Amino acid sequence: MYSLEALFCHVDDFCQEFEVQWQKKLLTQGGIKRRREKSLSLSEIMTILIAFHQNHYRDFKYFYLNQVKQYWNSAFPGLPSYQRFIEWLPSTLIPLCVYLKHCFGKGTGIGFIDSTSLKVCHNRRISRHRVFKDLASRGKTSVDWFFGFKLHLVGRSLVNC
């Protein structure tokens, strides 16, 4: 999604349904727990996090201070300081993971596999290497030989609903 407004609407629709279900599932303790209100809603926080990854910034602090605070201040009234926003991030982990899983779609049944080498030492030092002596072995990639392990990644193809 390239529009900030479209992204927010999609995230907000999800959060309205998710938060009701999530509050039902949470365990309650006997004592009274203080819940301080945030100046941004959960959907606004998640929108900023997703927009950070869509805009290809490398540094979140730079993105927040130079993009969000300067240009999106009117779109997000009540923007907190950078430090306060960072303090709120752990509370968005579960909703953000559920949202991303919701966006994945259904599996097509098509899988793919790839591998990469994990070199434990340079080829010249194989005879002197002692850390992974019994575990590591020589292997070959499409480029060259190595001494170490081969990491395999297996994935499935997904289709958006």
Image (cartoon, helix red, strand yellow):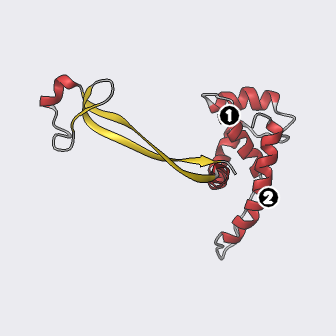
Q: Secondary structure at mark 2?
A: helix
Q: Residue at x 80, y 35 (%)?
A: 3
Which residue is painted at 12% across and 30% down in the image? Answer: 127
Q: How many numbered circles are shown? A: 2
Question: In the image, residue 17 lies at what x, y percent?
Answer: 77, 61
Q: Position of residue 81 (x, y in %)?
A: 73, 37
Tell me whether circle 2 and circle 1 mark residues in contact (CB < 8 Å): no
Crowding at dot 1, Cα within 10 Å, few <14 / some 14-19 / many 20+, comes out as: few
Res. 129 mark: none
Please name the residue shown 28% across and 24% down the image: 144
Amino acid type at circle 2 is: Gln
Disc 2 target residue: 16
Q: Amino acid at mark 1?
A: Gln
Residue that mark 1 sits on: 54
Q: Is residue 77 above or below residue 22?
A: above
Q: Is residue 10 above or below residue 61?
A: below
**Quarter where residue 132 is shown:** top left
* 81 to 57, vertically: above or below: below
Left or right: 66, with 72 as reference point = left
Q: Residue 159 location in percent, x, y?
A: 63, 48
